[in-house]
Image (spheres, rainbow, N blue to C red):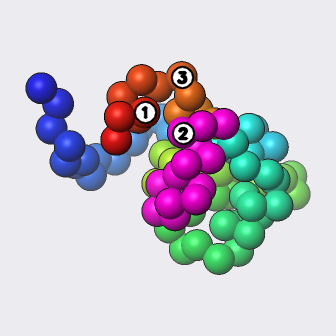
């Protein structure tokens, strides 16, 4: 049985995605992602050649903090492919 506790570990090779990829993975619009970049201090990003690159792990954490965004993640985003997320 899986434990519901998440342990904080440093990711050796984080996955970086663009704003449009983040929106597609999250099931939200690009404007929502850009708002999160400006408003949420926990969203890790970097700027390369005037383009945002967003850390996938922190993106998922930010989307799961808000119930509306979490539902979009589960229904329209990456969560529709993850069976365990549907039961949470």
Query: Bounds of the magenta span?
Result: 62-76
Q: In the rendered view, would you say 81 is above or below 66? A: above
Name the side, left or right, on which 52 lies relative to 36: right
Q: Label 2 to label 3, Cα distance in Å?
A: 8 Å
Q: In the rendered view, would you say 65 is above or below 77? A: below
Indicate the position of residue 33 as horizontal and vertical percent values: 72, 58
Q: Earlier in the sequence, mark 1 or mark 3?
A: 3
Camera-nearest residue between 85 and 22: 85
Q: In the rendered view, would you say 20 is above or below 47? A: above
Q: Which mark is residue 81?
A: 3
Mark 2 near mark 1, Cβ–Cβ under 8 Å? yes
Quarter of the image with the N terminus in it? top left
Quarter of the image with the C terminus in it? top left
Name the side, left or right, on which 59 lies relative to 32: left
Q: Is residue 49 visible?
A: yes
Q: Which residue is mark 1?
A: 86
Q: Label 1 to label 3, Cα distance in Å?
A: 9 Å
Q: Label 2 to label 1, Cα distance in Å?
A: 7 Å
Residue appearing at x 67%, y 67% in the figure = 36
Q: Main secondary structure of the magenta part?
A: helix
Q: Is residue 19 visible?
A: no
Q: How many residues crowd mark 2 within 10 Å: few (<14), some (14–19), many (20+)?
A: many
Q: Is residue 17 magenta?
A: no
């Amino acid at each position: 049985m899986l434990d519901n506790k998440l342990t904080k570990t440093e990711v050796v090779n984080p996955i970086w995605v663009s704003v449009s990829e983040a929106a597609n993975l999250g099931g939200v619009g690009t404007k929502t992602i850009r708002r999160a970049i400006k408003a949420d201090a926990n969203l890790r990003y970097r700027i390369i050649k005037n383009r945002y690159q967003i850390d996938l792990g922190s993106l998922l954490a930010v989307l799961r903090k808000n119930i509306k965004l979490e539902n979009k993640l589960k229904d329209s985003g990456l969560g529709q492919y993850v069976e365990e997320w549907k039961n949470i």
